[in-house]
Amino acid sequence: MKAATAIINRSALIHNYNTLKKLSPNSQLMAVVKANGYGHGALEIAKTLHFADYCGVARVDEALALRESGITSPILLLEGFVSEYCLPLLIEHQLETVIHCQEQLDMLLAFKSEQLIKVWLKLDTGMHRLGIRMEEAENAFMQLSCSAIVEKPINLMTHFACSDELDNPLTQNQINQFDTFSQTKAIGLSSLAASGGILFWPESRRDLNRAGIILYGVSPLTNKPAIDFDLKPVMQLESSLIAVRRHLKGESVGYNATWTGDRDTTIGVVAIGYGDGYSRSLKNGTPVLVNGREVPLIGRVSMDMITVDLGPNATDKVGDTVILWGKALPIERIALQNGLSPYELMTQLTSRLKLEYIDE
């Protein structure tokens, strides 16, 4: 009987990387492995994609874990650094960093070193989360250009706010702002496109594209699964039936009795819950695959288990495999039905969940 397990298909991962690379063959492609590789295991993803042009992480600790495990690919800190004490680590471990605020810029310019640091100045073209505001970008660019510690030329990047909204004019406006700023300057590499940009905004594919959720075979559009873009789901989340029970009409199941049967039926208890990262907010009726057929989630998701309605004529038995999402049941569908994001569903998977790697 299998406990809750995420089956990670390395062949699908490599297929996705190569497929995305073909969309812009003259560009470099970053494998974004932050948040434990979107729940897939950052180290194993980085090892599998050892040929990737770049790895992208959010924080210094994530980068150090990769370096300490032998990953030699260029690594970019997408949030930059939070303390001047991080700066020696950037040099020691050959890490590249985003600069997105004046505080980071001041720390960098005050740092003394004979070795150069490769930086990416992040422009706030419309996301308004991180990045140097456009009216302040000229001064920031000048300060970096005059610094003796910064590798030249300066690299530029930005991040889209609405790239998954194909009729939203903001993305094109962000591209225009980026180009207006950069066209009069001698810059190094430029990076605009993350997952949505790579798929839907070809004019944003520049020197370095950043593949996040699409690398793992999940679409940023929940109503259009990744298989429509020739991308393969890398993860299959599965577990086993640990009990099969007769259930009578009028009986409820689970905490707070959120579901009551309207017929005699058979329920299955599955060994997975929010302790494994299967979201407690998933609703009654969320599809689950048991022996190749869809059955509905019923009752509240518990810490260690869920219940499903197997139907009155069920022949399922204890030990049978249950699939929560994967190739046959896209995670985009689970997210759409519950008003959630696939990002959230994958990255909240916990350390109790077993990760099993296959090549097929």
Image: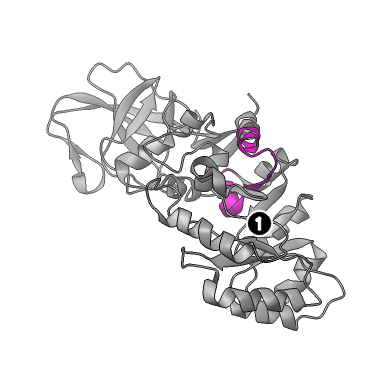
Residue found at the very far front of the displayed protein: 184
User: Residue tagged by mark 1?
Assistant: 190
Q: Position of residue 186 (x, y in %)?
A: 72, 64
Q: Which residues are magenta?
A: 16-40
Residue in view at x 79 percent, y 62 percent:
93
Residue 330, placed above or below residue 45: above
Q: How many marks?
A: 1
Between 333 and 199, which is closer to the camera in this rendering? Answer: 199
Colour option used: one colour
Quick check: is 298 in the magenta stretch? Answer: no
Q: Position of residue 294 (x, y in %)?
A: 33, 25
Q: Position of residue 153 (x, y in %)?
A: 76, 65
Q: Determine the residue positioned at 69% across, 66% down.
A: 185
The C terminus appears in which quarter of the rendering? top right
Question: Vertical placement of 301 versus 137: above or below?
Answer: above
Residue shown at 13% from the left, 30% from the top: 262
Report if residue 18 lies within the magenta region: yes
Circle 1 — which element? strand
The answer to whether any part of residue 252 appears in the image is: yes
Q: Residue at x 25, y 39 (%)?
A: 284
Amino acid type at image mark 1:
Ser
Badge 1: how crowded within 10 Å, few (<14), some, or many (20+)? many
Query: Closer to the camera, 37 or 168?
Result: 168
